[in-house]
Amino acid sequence: MEVRVANVRKEFDRFPALHDVSLDIRSGELIALLGPSGSGKTTLLRLIAGLEMPTAGKIFFGDTDASEKTVQERNIGFVFQHYALFRHMTILENISFGLKVRPRSTRPPAGEIRRRAMELLDLVQLSGLEKRYPNQLSGGQRQRVALARALAIEPGVLLLDEPFGALDAQVRRELRKWLREIHDRTGHTTVFVTHDQEEALELSDRLCVMSQGKIEQVGSPDEVYDHPTSPFVFGFIGDSSELPVTIENGEVWVGGRAIGIPAHDTPTGPARLYFRPHDADLIEADASMAGVVTASRRVGGTRRVELEVGGDGHKVEIDLPFDHPAGEKTRLSFRPKRWKLFPAA
Amino acid sequence: MSAAASALSRSRKRNVIPGFGLTLGFTLTYFSLIILIPLLALAIRSAGLGFDGFWKAATDPRVLGSLRVSFVTALIAAGVNVVFGTLIAWVLVRYRFPGRRIFDAIIDLPFALPTAVAGIALTAIYAPNGTIGALFAPFGIRIAYTPIGIVIAMIFIGLPFVVRTIQPILEEVSHEVEEASATLGATRFQTITRVILPSLTPAILTGFALAFARGVGEYGSIIFIAGNIPFVSEIAPLLIYIRLQEFNYVGATVIASVMLLISFALLFAINLIQAWSRRRYGYGD
């Protein structure tokens, strides 16, 4: 089902949590709401779920206005960070809860409920554990039960609030892959909240980057990573280096020296240059940035070098192959092959 | 003894937390001095009668009547307390309203108030010419000087036990669990009956046991409000007191022993159910 968030504003006791947010979620896609804490991503998710009501604006499920509907009427599946399983029920009872509480007229017969719950248990690869209680399962297993429970009601939209936030790194990676598989198999429109950019980039079809109650950028992982539209997105997604520069004669200048980067579209004056550490090329030309090496450390297959550039104590990071001879030098010249200029703040 | 000693020394070797021997020794000594020896004296005293004598004293109609009044009223009062105590705990935990903290503090007053004061105050209000008693008097319902009065006094003194056992557990039941229930389509009523109450069961049982035990043992407040009519509103603790005044010490110990036995059996049963429900509902590990 499509979900349309239209000009939604949300205030908590006069404190604004979301300012005029609009977002179109396509049917069947897996979209991540990504942002630092306090960016409003969880609030947006809870508004879609109906766990909070918007101060202004509307939320549409398909063509119907869902804004005035209660949580129960919206038919959504919600997965909480801390599982929120019913600990006095077995795993099977947890999964069938959503079907058992339906009014008699729409409730499937008991045998059918059991069959569907067992099927879901199989889907989340926990067959044989139906008689256990939640406290007898590991964190990863509990979260899978929570997902099965949410899927049992055949929700129109599946909403996940930091679903892997409470799990350790290894389990998180496994579950991430597994969630993607489940999504591809069941095809639910899925929205998940995360503050982990790696998770968002790896898992989602599109991501929606949020900051301070506003949407900064919406796009595919490639778009957002390669063409960030704001300094915040550039800094938040992936590693980045930032440097204050001056634009003059359609060129970028650092510390009184043109560095060989054209800037025809940027107005003359101060600006900020952003680039990724892995996009820096070492060059021995005059038109380059030169810096004094202040630190150097090995990160996996590369060496990350910290340089002081431009004489004002500004530091940037660039990546070199770990066995590159330049790693021994105290002074390096380089130029980014991809970059982005933003007006000075 | 030697098996116990070797078990002790074994666990001393294994236990990471130091001071096991010291604290267990202290616990046993203390337990003996405060609880075990007085109860043992009681048992020995009543055993002096022999079984037939004991049975005769215990099955005296007035004794049976007083025991029935005591246990029936205590069970009813504990039942009422569980219902309304849970409700009060819910209100105190879930809502924020002006005066909540004061209200919260008032809950504990029955703990502190001398029970005689409570008894006199309740009698004054529930007597046929009292503020509340006068409302019921026209319908021929008498509260003070009947078993209903006993139940009310027991409710008064037992309430804090229920509220204070349920409150912390209710605070622990996360709000997320309720939200999860709502997202799955459960109505408010279904969430309360199927999700919240079952997870409170162990705490409710504890509260019930405590309120019940307190009610059975209560003396001070009840004698004022009960009217103390033998076979109708005479409680067992009062009959013990009456026997003592008649210098019938053996008769008093017999009633006390029977009370203890019944109370112990009931509390033990409640403890078993509670242990089962704790396991069942996933507490304790």
Image: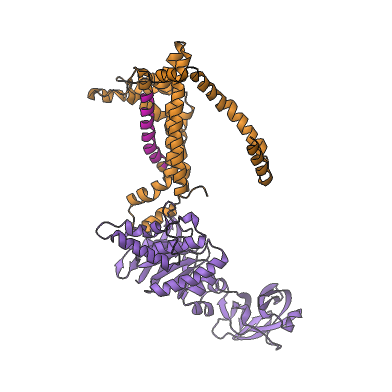
- Residue A172 in the image: state x and y as whole percent: 53, 67
Q: Is residue B264 left or right of residue A75?
A: right
The residue lying furthest to the top in this view is B246
Quadrant of the rendering where the C terminus of chain A is positioned = bottom right
Vertical placement of A249 versus B162: above or below?
A: below
**SS assignment for the magenta stretch, majority:** helix
- Residue B11 in the image: state x and y as whole percent: 65, 43
Figure colour of chain B = orange
A225 and A142: which is toward the camera: A142
Please say whether residue A328 is one of the residues in the magenta stretch. Answer: no
- Decide if residue B116 is in sight here: no
Please say whether residue B76 is one of the residues in the magenta stretch. Answer: yes
Q: Where, by quadrant of the figure, is residue A314 drawn?
A: bottom right
Q: Where, by quadrant of the figure, is residue A113 drawn?
A: bottom left
Figure colour of chain A = purple
Vertical placement of A106 versus A180: above or below?
A: above
The residue lying furthest to the bottom in this view is A285
The residue lying at 38 percent from left, 64 percent from top is: A118
Total numbered badges shown on the rendered structure: 0
- Decide if residue A184 is in sight here: yes
- Residue B223 in the image: state x and y as whole percent: 40, 19
Vertical placement of A235 versus B245: above or below?
A: below
The residue lying at 32 percent from left, 56 percent from top is: A101
Q: Which residues are magenta?
A: B67-89
- Residue B187 in the image: state x and y as whole percent: 32, 53
A45 and A150: which is toward the camera: A150
Vertical placement of B66 versus A18: above or below?
A: above
